[in-house]
Amino acid sequence: MTDDVQGRIVALIPAAGQGTRLGLDRPKAFVELDGQTLLNRSIDAVRASGVVDQVVVIVPPELVDDVRARFPEVSVVAGGAERSDSVRAGLAAADPDTELVLVHDAARALTPPALFARVVEALRGGAGAVVPGLPVTDTLKRVDDTGVVIDTPNRAELRAVQTPQGFTAELLRRAHASAADATDDAGLVEALGEPVVVVPGEARAFKITTPFDLRLAELLCGTPDVVEPDPEEQPS
Ligand code: CTP
Ligand code: MG
């Protein structure tokens, strides 16, 4: 746990999505991976990081009572139609004296606890907004509605960003004061013209989105972390 001098840290875990692309019979965060739900695994990872004082999970309205009973030590609130509505609902439930906020997708169920600490370290170093990111390995194309390529962004400048994304509470509240939607919270901060810093991400923090991702997560469960070569020494 953090000490009070440095201010309190809350983790918001949005888990209110339907999981349409996964296509199972329940909301994605309630799907099991080797006997534990994605939500359960994400709560455990946040707590194992040791850097968070309060955990707020945001779930579909009909599951609030169930989740409260199952996880008495976390705050549980009902989510909204879009991810950003859910994050706003979670932010409203954060302690008023919160200094830093981490927002972490329940769907990134295999995220190593150390990644939370890395993001907090960058915030403690003075950044207002921090996202984990990995270099992209595929060449990416921008395409029009008909599937014709418009252009090819320079891959060296691109990062695939993950969660936990970290913010000062003041900045995240300001970013969410508008009714805007974005696929990540950093996008709302960028829209304010405020800087967002990227720190190294983790391959295991990938988002379980499709049936293939769930299979991959099943295969990775219980396997040790892979040690990657130093990216500085790799060709892009
Ligand atoms: N999320 C949320 N509230 C929403 C939509 C999404 O809390 N209205 C959460 C999801 O539960 C997930 C995270 O945001 O943990 C990332 O969203 P995504 O991967 O898109 O999950 P879903 O929206 O559930 O999936 P899909 O888009 O395939 O329906
Ligand atoms: Mg979604």
Image: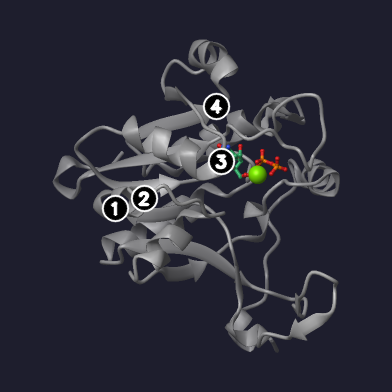
Relative to 223, say whether 68 is above or below. above
Query: Which tag, 4 or 2, sits closer to the chain's start?
Result: 4
- Residue 59: mark in rendering: 4
As helix, strand or loop, the secondary structure at mark 1 comes to helix
* Element marked by disc 2: loop
Q: Which residue is mark 1?
A: 174
Q: In which quadrant of the rendered view does residue 144 lie?
A: bottom right
- The picture places residue 37, in percent across and down from the top left corner, at 67, 28
Colour treatment of the image:
one colour
Q: Give above or below for 169 relative to 196.
A: above
Q: Is the residue marked by circle 3 packed among few (<14), some (14-19), or many (20+) residues within 10 Å? A: some
Marks 3/1: CA distance? 18 Å
Q: Front-most of 102 and 121?
A: 102
- Quadrant of the image containing the C terminus: bottom right
Q: Does dot 4 land on a helix, a strand or a loop?
A: strand
Q: Is residue 213 above or below residue 143?
A: above
Which residue position is annotated with label 2? 178
Question: Does the rendering let one see residue 136?
Answer: yes
Task: Check if mark 2's residue and mark 1's residue have beta carbons within 8 Å.
Answer: no
Tell me which amino acid carries mark 1. Answer: Arg
Establish whether ligand 1 lies closer than 8 Å to the Cβ of label 3: yes
Which comes sooner in the sequence, label 4 or label 3? 4
Task: Tell me how far mark 2 sits from mark 3, CA to CA.
Answer: 14 Å
Image coordinates for residue 227, horizontal then vertical, percent: 67, 65
- Residue wearing tag 3: 82
Q: Earlier in the sequence, mark 2 or mark 3?
A: 3
**Position in image of residue 69 (x %, y %):** 51, 10
Q: Position of residue 176 (x, y in %)?
A: 37, 49
- Nearest the camera: 13 or 179? 179
Q: Which mark is residue 216?
A: none
Disc 4 versus disc 3: distance between alpha carbons? 12 Å
Q: Nearer the viewer, mark 4 or mark 1?
A: 1
